Every structure is written in structure tokens, then in C-alpha cells.
Amino acid sequence: MKVEFNLNGEDLSMELSGDERVLDILRDRVGIPSCREGCGTGECGACTVLVDGESRLSCLMVSAQLDGKTVTTVEGIRDLPRWAPLFESFDRLGAVQCGYCTPGMVLAAVDLLTRNPDPSRDEVRIALSGNICRCTGYRAIVDAVMEGAEIMRGLSL
Amino acid sequence: MRGPLVAGISVPRIEGMAKVRGEERYASDITGPGILWAVARRAGIPSGILRSLGDEPVSMDGVVAVCKADSIEGENLLGVLEPDQPVLVPLGGRIRYRGDPVAVVVADTRERAEAAARALTVEIDPLPAVFDPPEALSPDAPLLYPDREGGNLLVSGWVRRGDAKSVLEDCDLVEEDVFRFPMQEHAYLETESGVALYDGENLEMEVSTQNPWRDRDELSRALGLPRERIRVKAPCLGGGFGGKDGVVIQGILGAAAMACPGRTVKMVFSREESFLCSPKRHSSVTEMTLGCSSDGFLRAIRCRFTLDSGAYASMSVPVLTNGLDHCCGAYRFEAVELEGRAVYTNNPFGGAFRAFGAPQVMGALEQLVDRLAKRLGMDPLEFRKKNGLVRGDMNGSGVVLTSTVGAVPCLDRALEQEIWTSREEWRNSAPEGKARSTGAALICHGQGFGPGIPDFANARIELTEEGRFRLYSGIPDMGQGNGSTYVHLAGEPLCQERDRFDLVQPDTDRSLRSGPAAASRTTYIYGRALLAAVDELKRRMYVKAGMVLGAREDDLVLLPGRMRCISSGRELPLEVLAGFMELPERCSVAGSLAPVSFPGPETDYGPKNSGFPHCIFSWAVHVARVEVDLFTGQVSVPRYLAVTEAGRVVNPQMYRQQVEGGVAQGLGYALFEDFSVKNGEVVSKDLSTYIIPTSMDLPEVECLAVELDEPSGPKGLKGLGELPLIGPLPAVANGLANICGPLTASPFTAERVFFSLSGGARDEGRV
């Protein structure tokens, strides 16, 4: 089937079988390596993408669900000034270790902060609870989201 | 941070932003047009003889090659210490666990390769199997290696010093118990993955690995290619924790590539395949007896522990000896009698996992120590202080500790922390239906390899024509940040900013052999070699700058980006200086052999030459606040303190990452992680049934560093990677023991705790 969607601001039209995983389409057909597979069963969150602005697990979505949607990965937001403080906080505060989960973690944070620019630590923890990190213990990640949010509020972006 | 790098100040990792932006390339991210996918077919039966393999995949759409054992020209055997693991099981060969690969199918897409691997007919004559170590040692047990001397007993070892039996009889108080801990899965987010290309002569591989050089050696032997025709590159790993220290995917990936000359072949394990086929933390049974005098001095210890090695040896021998080495923990004993064994079974195999056998023994020891303190009516930390090792003491393995020993300083620091001093208030503050308590543990972990394995590293650093510094790492970075720490270590003596460094990840053709990312050795040993290489490079830069500027060397100083003549004020940018130097001058190499072991102390010990004993340790005290829901048994750990002595802290941010990450994995081991295997089949097959901690499950860990200056370590540091994983299980268990009595089987799930609260029969766990 023909599937039309917008990926990181670019309109795409692709001939796909309806049951292809969105994760595979992004990684293998379009070349978005930051969208990563950790489990394939919707448990780890490494393959998180934003679909119409909300975080979704691309390993649990199939091509047909993409039609008419807007899909965002970190490639689509990493150069936007609006989110720069969040990226910088992840780096500066040591929220990154092996880094395999990090793009998914950033996108989950973006989803939260779009809805709630001033979250509590508990709200951040809840929002990130679908994204597993095996390295950090999460404290630094929560710090990064809190500090990134604070800077962004100051900038009123 | 602006300005030159300084030890002791936090600096974000060099590749941090690339990782946040999704630009870092892991082995699993490598892709390109025309890339082929390989998928292995696994036996699916725990024991048997492989009789036949069909040819169905050959005619299937997109299939490029079907690789079986007969197409492998080398020895077809893998294994670091004991080459017992076939790359592919040959016809007539033995199946020893469900994950044994019997063939690899290569196709133009992953789906087609998977379908073809599934379609392959596999005939196996089943044989009796054995899944329990004691049963495997019985005389009529089926043998995994019928021709092997020793049968299913892979290895046994012992340590004897003094007469533990009679000292124990003479002790005023004795505590003993049997502890059962299950397998633990690394569960790195990036499963085993890599790409390989064979051009008809040379095999090049980029793979998620902790030791590319040893991989190259093993591939050479197993696949029958000379070593110099194999190149292995290790990009940043998406986690490792020991699970990628050894060949897991490399053999079948290499075989698949050699079956398709000229084409790049990619392989990524599914999560289920990774759970089945990667090494595990060994499940264990630890029987331990501990005795002390009525005035509170520990006197003797006896311990026997059994590890389930599963189908292959992997790292079981050094894991066992490391366990023996850590049996006595951080304490002085008059008499010691330790015995350990690792047993082959038809289960998935045990191997390297962060802390390498120490959690299985210290998880028992620290609970018994607490029980003795309680019976004596002593503060458990004061009891530990009374018995804790100090410099000059002989440890359990018979080593007189001549290096930094932080046990007592860590205890002193923990004793004054609020989490400890307020434990009565915490206990009394429990709301209705809940109980609260505080538990602690004193732990240690050895540094580097033990005797018999030279613990060396070779560093290479280069001043480039652009006046930058290119550092060729010899040890992969699996996420712990060692690459950045190398830059940090080099940056201070070179007086350069972080951004003037380029870091080359390990590559057997470009960097130098330096051993694995393992054994808490990485920063310590590579750092030693690197500082020597930096010294030499600096010396040459001063000589050359002196010649160019016509100045005495002691009138020169290296500053960020330039060399300056102090008296004249003239400056020489580094790119200009580099222009006066040829490549051999600009490139400095140095090796270092770590002084972390010596031939062995006066103790009766076997087996020889397998990593026993260590002589330098890092130390820590962990304190956990626990809360139990008395109606459900649910345990939470709302607060946690780790006081750590691992020498000087070079980068506080990364130091904290290591501590917090280790505690997170240790709390997972204590509370949730139950790698369940029934009849050799993995029951917890995925991340929905094998529960690892999420952001909702962990406390924010308070990290304190006691910085003793380790004279043998670069900038005074010691290794830290493994230590923090050991503490959580006993600290939590000791907290829980005050509420529900002793817990001898982990993980401490709500079910187990509830059962214990309601006074049920002892839970023997499952091993």
C-alpha cells in the first residue's frame, strides 16, 4: 500500500506492505539510526518516536498507522533552538552513559515538556518510566529534564 | 568546562552530545545499500546429537547463503580458557543447550533470513539432560563432555589457611546458612550486533565487543584465517557489563560473512536470542559458616559455593576464583576454609558479569556478619569497623595489604551520615500497614586480573598536523566513559582543553592491544600506560619547541594550543610545532604492566594460575533504607547511600555514574531480576518477564567518595566499575531481615517477602 507521512518536516510517500514495523521503515528504509531497537516488544522505549507530537513506540506500530501522520525523531528537533537546552542538559549533567537509550529518552521528555513545561521530579519519573536505561539509575536523566525545562521556561520558548 | 582539563573536576564525556543527538554509530546502526542479513538457527533442544540439516533455505526468495559447520575451515571452537563452544554444531556433534547454533542463513533482508532459518529442518536425537549442578555431579548424571576428565565438574578451587574447623568449634558465636541466588542477565539495551565483510582474503568486522584483540585471536583459530588477515573494530557499545567480554556473535557473524565474499553481512540478535545465548551471572548456592568471639572479633569462615556454569566454560574459571578471592570480604580471619566449584549443566552458560562472582559470596557473607552483630547487640557498622581490614593486615586470601585500604575510612564516614544516625527515627516513622528499617553492607572488589594473566595495556597518542591530540584507545567504551577519562587523564599534563582531543575507538589495525574492558582494570591500567606515553610525547614536544624557538627547555611551557617561551614571551602554535615533527616523533606509544597481583601468598590453594589472588582493592559501605508493605510484601528502597573508596576521583561526574549505575543494577539483582530457566529453557524471555528497574523503581543514590591516594594508580585512582553492584543485595537483605527475618533466596520479591512475613516454611529458592 501507498503510505504518506511527514518525517521531520519532509513529506514522504512510500510503497509499503501494511504490516511493516515503523521501526524498520525508519531504520532500514529511511536511514534514521537514532531510532533503536532494544526489545521489539514495547518494553524498553529505545525506539520512541513522536507521532503527531505524542511519544509512541515504533516497534509496536505498523506502516498503515503512519498514513497521514507527522513523525518526529531526534534528527527532527536536535537543531531547533527551542530544545537546545534539553540536549545540552543531558550532555552537561551526565545523563548519558552508553547512550543507546538516550534519543528515545529525549523524545519522551519532549513529549512531557510539550504538555507540561513545569513538571515535578515525580512527573518526570512517571513520564520516563517506559524508557529503560540500564546504565544510569535515572537520577541524572531526571536532573537533565528538570534543568532543561527550567532553562527553557526562562527562555519562554 | 572552559580551559585545560584538571583532574578532580567534572567534565562531560567527549562523545556525550553525539549520543544525545543520535549521531553516535553503534555496531547495530551500521547500514548501507546491498547489506545482507544473517540469522542463526538454534537447536531448541537442551541435549542431543545433531543428525541432519535440511536444504530448504537454499531455494527460498532472497537467500544468499546457508552456512553450516562443514563450511568452516578452522577448528570451529570458541572459548577463552577452554575452547569448548562450537561456532556451529557439526553433524554428529553434540547439542548442549537450547541456544546452540546449528546453521546461519544469509539473505537480502532480515525477514527473509528469519523465515529461511525457521524453515530449515533440523533433526536432533535427544539425549538425557541435566539442569541442576548437584545432580550433574552425581555418578549417573548424563555427561556433557563424555571424553572429558572430571566429567561435569568444570573446575574446583579451594583456599585453606589455619584450621577453620577447630577455630569455629572454639568460637563463642557461630552463624551459618545456605544462600541461593539466581542467574542475572546483563540486559544491555543494545543486543549483540555487528557487521562483517570478507573480501576473499581478509575479514573485517565491526562489532559490539569488550575485547577486539581477543576476538581476533579466537576468530583466527575458529574460522581458520591468519590473525593478520582479520581486523576487528569496536565502536561505542550500547552496554556490555561483561556480557560482551567473549565471543557471542562474532563467530557466527564471521562464518556468515565468509560464506558471502564481497558482501557486507549484518547480524543483530533479537532480545529473546540475546537472553538465551549470551553469558549470564552464574546462579549459585553458597553455604557459609562464620564464627566470632563474644567480644566481637571475627575468627573463622568456612564457605562452599557452587556455580552453575551451564553448557560452556566461558569465564567460569576466573569467576570462581574471583568468588574465592572475595569470600572473606573486607575482614580479618584467623582461619579460612573456602571451596568453590563450577559445574557443567544443559542450561544457558554463565560467564562474565560486573563483579564476577563476588556478589554470590558477599551477598551471603554480609548477611551473616549482620546476624553476628545483632546477636552481640552491637551496631552493625561498629562491628564491621572492629573487624575491617586496614593496611598491613592479611586478608582472607593470605595477602598482606600493602596498598590503600578504605574499609574503615568508609565505615567512619557512613557512621556519621544522617541516613545511618536517624535509623531509629526512620524505623519508628512507619505508617500503619508498613514497616521500615535500615540495612548496611561493607564490600570490596579487586583491581584487575590476578596472577597468571599479565594485566597490561599499551597506549598510543599522537600530535596531529593540525596541532590536535589523537588518542587511540585500546579498550572499548561500553558506556562507562573510559575513553573520556583517558582524554581527561592526558589533558591535565598536556594542559589542553577537551575539545583539542580526538578519540579513536579500539581497532586492531590502528590502536594497540590492551586487554578487555573488564575487571575494574580499564582506567587504571590504560591510564598508567597513557600517562607514560604522554610524558614521552611532551618531552619530544619540548625538545622540538626548544630547537624552533631557540630556547632552553626549562624556559618553555605547554599551554592550551601552544608552546610559550617564558622569558621571551614568544609562542609557537601546536600546529606549527607539529609541522616541524615527523609522524614517528609526533606519535608516542607506551606500555604498562599493572602491579595488581603477584605469584601468590602462603596459602593452600587450587587451581593455580587463574586469577587468584588480587592485592589491590576498592572499598565501599552501602546503606539502604527499606520499607515493606505488610499486606502485600512489596519492598521499596526510598533512600540509598554509597560511600566509596576507589582512590582519587579524576572526573566526579563519571565516578558518580559508575556508582549509581552499579547500585541500579545491584538493586535490580536484589529486588526484581530473576532469570528463570526451566529444563534449560529460558522462561523470562523478554523485558516484560525479566524485570529490570525503571525510573519509578530506584532511589536517588547519595554518593560520597573517600579519596585515598593510590600510589600505583594514574593520578591516584583505582578501578570502580564492579564494586557498586555488590552492595545492594546484602544491604537490602539486612534491612529486610529486621522486618521479616532472614532472606536467603533472591530476588526479594513481594511474594517471597510476604511469605517470610507470614512465617512460611523457608524458601529454598531455585537455582
Image (cartoon, rainbow, N blue to C red):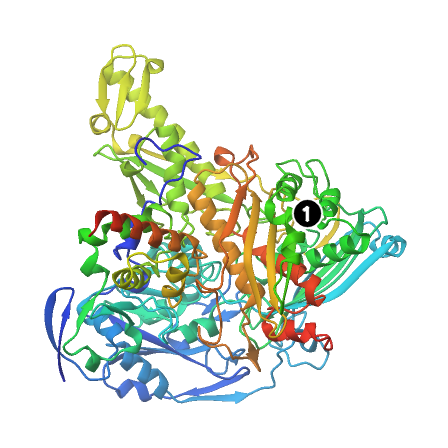
Residue lying furthest front: B432
Q: Quadrant of residue B602?
A: top right
Q: Can the viewer see residue B445 in this picture?
A: no
- Residue at screen point 48% across, 35% down: B714
Mark 1, secondary structure of its residue: loop
Q: Residues within 10 Å of mark 1 (few under 14, many from 20)?
A: many
- Residue at screen point 25% across, 10% down: B568
| Left or right: where A29 falls relative to B632 | left
User: Disc 1 is attached to a residue of which chain?
Assistant: B
- Rendered position, B708 above or below B569: below
Tag 1: amino acid: Ala
| Left or right: where B9 falls relative to B371 | left
Give the position of the N terminus of chain B as an image quadrant.
top left
Q: Residue A39 at what x, y percent from top left? A: 38, 72
- Residue at screen point 43% across, 71% down: B274
Q: Residue B404 at what x, y percent from top left? A: 61, 36
Q: Residue B314 at what x, y percent from top left? A: 54, 64
- Identify residue for label 1: B330
Q: Can the viewer see residue B407 in this picture?
A: yes
